[in-house]
Amino acid sequence: MSIEYNSKLIASLYDEVDPEKAAEISDEMVEIHDPIFIQPIYSAFKKFKNTHFSHYFLSDLVEFKTPETTEIFKAVVSSEDKRGADFSYCIEYFSDIDYIEDSLINKVYLQVLDELLKNNTNEYDLEDYLEYLLKAKSLSLVSVHLRNAFENEDQKSDVKSISLNFFLKENPSTNLRYYLENFDRIKGKKSEIILAKTLIKWKGKIVESLKQKILDEGTSHAQEIIKSEIKKKTSEQQEIEKNIAITYNNSEIISEISQLRSRINVFSQGDNRFGFPIFLQSELLFPQTKAPEDKTTFKSYCNDLRSFIQSLTKDLVNHGFSEEEIKEKFPQIQERKSINLLYLYLKSKGFSINDDIFNLRKLNQIVSKMAHPDDEKGLLDILRENGLLELYSSDNFQDLHRELLKKYKVFLEGLLNCFQKE
């Protein structure tokens, strides 16, 4: 059965002419994770190479870490007509598999220089490139350029922050001491504020000396950033306990989610309107007991959470609606998979649900856009609509992640309550 289904998926991908719909098919292939999908996804990448969606296929190929995918990424990175986002995903892949090669280091070096000279630098790409150079122990190649980008007041704040962070990583002792001795270069500028915000994340004697330098000679805003950090440390033991709680505070809600899914499966298996479990077994959520510490981890969690909430039984395809009935009654349903199949099945059995299925669709949109954060405006809009923008803007990924888990729990509670009532 799986061979037949996979075969149809491959045929659908080859036939699809809409890049966005093709990307959705590719995402489903990643969920199944059969290596037979590698070449079809690569073919889709080449087919839609000149569209905004080309890198979506590469991001899916990243999930298949095989010698075959490595050769594909080598071919893409060597292409003369690759897009910037395509190159970025290649570098992310090579970082993941620790593939370090001199000619690739040189390509990344040139790309970093290009990014730092652009007025519309993509900070996601820049960070991927710098992570690769850090792993390759080659950050020294761009050290001066990073320092100049940090000190450039016309540069975007995010780029300035990333540049400073990697400038310090390149040679922490020497480069921290540089600003201890040359504080006047940034005093009274945006760079001083960014330095203060960065220092509170670092430790060491030179770090403390540089903080004191800001307290003695810096502007009031920068001083307040350092003072606020000092205040937080006055109750050090409480802070440690708080951090422990934050780090592991997802165990309870994940356990609740697991129990709710189990209860719904028990109900659906025993109900003659179903006769099968709705949710597939999945271990993707359990590693998220530990809250994300940074944007990279949070992005990875969102990617797994998207797969987790879409892990629904294929039996939902037996909803009983004909294509004509679907087009007539539910014209908003374009794709016949996952969440849409759940919606159609519940509707066919007379359950009272709205189009969003207890906000499941909105949650799926959020985690999908976080997993592919290229549409920045679209991401910010949907976060704003759901009251999550402030957490995202303040880099509070721990609380943001927990809010997403809460939204999924609310969906499960709504679904179970619907079943019990009807």
Image: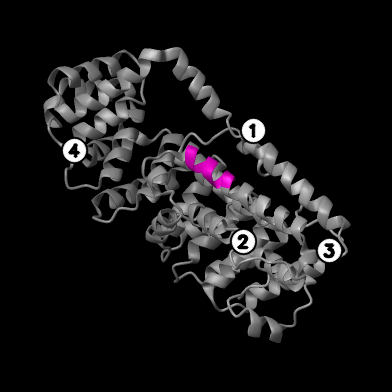
Please state the extent of the stretch shown in magenta in the rendering: 399-406
Which residue is rendered at x = 55% and y = 48% of the image? 302
The extreme front residue here reads 421
Above or below 378: residue 135: above
Which circle marks residue 27 in the picture? 2
**Earlier along the polypeptide chain: callout 2 or callout 3?**
2
The first of marks 2 and 1 along the sequence is 2
**Residue at image mark 3:** 274
Residue pictured at 36% horizontal, 20% vertical = 232
- Left or right of 175: which side holds 22? right
**Secondary element at tag 1:** helix
2 vs 1, front mark: 1
Q: Secondary structure at mark 4?
A: helix
Residue 251 image label: 1
Q: Is residue 141 left or right of residue 98?
A: left
Alpha carbon distance from label 3 to label 4: 60 Å
Among the two numbered marks 4 and 2 on one chain, the one whose residue lies closer to the N terminus = 2
Is 175 part of what is drawn in magenta? no
Q: Secondary structure at mark 3?
A: loop
Tell me which colouring the rendered structure shows: one colour
The tag earlier along the polypeptide, 3 or 1, is: 1
Quadrant of the frame with the N terminus: bottom right
The x, y position of residue 152, in whole percent, is: 18, 42
- Tell me the tag on residue 157: none
* Distance between the alpha carbons at the discs numbered 3 and 1: 30 Å
Q: Which residue is mark 4?
A: 190
